[in-house]
């Protein structure tokens, strides 16, 4: 028989966007809606992941999970990602026996449904929700045989900025406009600041469909609030008017932002080759902690 995988050798996503894509995929495509999670210190991760592996079949291979699913046994995934000296973790389960949906499970009382309003998965500034969005579709007209386009309302899982984060960003835009802080997008060694810097930072976020819509909303808010203040800014900085003429104090047009600066997230590999592991993120800060669990494998 092949050697059982140690829980410390579970792979870690290559970056934050890859992590968010994988969480979205698990909830959306394969139905792992029941979950629990939290944040733990790296120094406590070794003991914690060993405890989770003793409770749930998180080290099973794809073939073994298929076998478990046919027998009605829960298929469970453990996801983790290090931010500084903390590790964000999620345990996701389908509806099988022994999983988080099973009332006899040790963690059933703290399990949440990702579909429920109070059970959404959260990571930093973002929340994973089942949302409605407009998609552009094209079909061939049966009479003219020419393509005809239209918008269609569809529902899908996507990441969005949390309500509190959007509120803070809108307030930041209001302050920048109030104080005539036109600012700069940065680059070439210069720091981004002011209204333009804030908007440029928003465009650098992981542009899931939900986030992209919110970033456009923030740009529209900025456009509407800045428009009456732009003449005041031009009066205060005549040298910029002399240098940039009609473009002085102008924000990037919404159409240009939509066309050129909000690319959709491309397909990407979730894990690097070879992938980083839980063992690696522990060893980065406290290699001596690995002696807590030794190098024993956990099998199910």
Image (cartoon, rainbow, N blue to C red):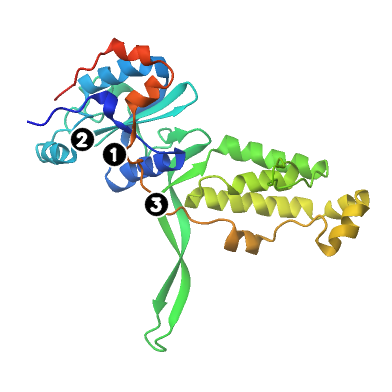
Q: Which mark is residue 32?
A: 1
Question: Local crowd at mark 3 within 10 Å, few (<14), some, or many (≥20)?
Answer: few
Sequence-earlier tag: 3 or 1? 1
Question: Local crowd at mark 2 within 10 Å, few (<14), some, or many (≥20)?
Answer: many
Q: Secondary structure at mark 1?
A: loop
Q: Residue at x 31, y 42 (%)?
A: 26
Sequence-earlier tag: 1 or 2? 1
Pointer 2: what residue? 75
Q: Nearer the viewer, residue 146 or 288?
A: 288
Say whether residue 65 is left or right of residue 30.
left
Q: Is residue 35 above or below residue 142?
A: above
Say whether residue 130 is left or right of residue 253.
left
Dot 3 and dot 1 residues touching (CB under 8 Å)? no
Q: Residue reaching furthest left?
A: 1
Image coordinates for residue 91, horizontal then vertical, percent: 31, 29
Q: Which mark is residue 156?
A: 3
């Amino acid at each position: 028989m092949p050697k059982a995988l140690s829980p410390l050798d579970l792979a870690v996503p290559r970056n934050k966007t890859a992590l968010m894509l994988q969480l979205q995929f698990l909830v959306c495509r394969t139905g792992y809606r029941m979950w629990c999670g939290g944040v733990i210190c790296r120094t406590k991760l070794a003991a914690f992941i060993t405890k989770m592996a003793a409770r749930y079949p998180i080290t099973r291979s794809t073939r073994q999970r298929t076998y478990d699913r046919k027998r009605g046994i829960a298929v469970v995934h453990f996801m983790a990602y290090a931010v500084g000296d903390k590790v964000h973790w999620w345990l996701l389960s389908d509806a099988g026996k022994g999983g988080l949906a099973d009332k006899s499970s040790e963690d059933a009382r703290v399990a949440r449904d990702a579909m429920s309003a109070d059970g959404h998965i959260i990571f930093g500034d973002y929340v994973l929700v089942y949302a409605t969005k407009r998609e552009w579709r094209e079909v061939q007209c049966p009479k003219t045989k020419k393509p005809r386009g239209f918008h269609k309302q569809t529902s899908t899982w996507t990441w969005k900025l949390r309500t509190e984060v959007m509120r803070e960003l809108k307030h930041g835009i209001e302050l920048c406009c109030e104080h005539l802080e036109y600012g700069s997008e940065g680059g070439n060694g210069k720091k981004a600041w002011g209204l333009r810097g804030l908007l440029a930072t928003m465009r650098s976020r992981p542009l899931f469909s939900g986030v992209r819509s919110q970033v456009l909303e923030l740009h529209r808010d900025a456009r509407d609030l800045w428009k009456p203040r732009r003449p005041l800014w031009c009066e205060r900085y005549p040298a910029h008017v002399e240098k940039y003429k009609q473009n002085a104090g102008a924000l990037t047009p919404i159409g240009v932002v939509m066309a050129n600066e909000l690319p959709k997230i491309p397909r990407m590999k979730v894990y690097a080759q070879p992938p980083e592991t839980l063992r690696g993120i522990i060893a980065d800060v406290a290699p001596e902690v690995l002696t807590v669990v030794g190098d024993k494998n956990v099998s199910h």
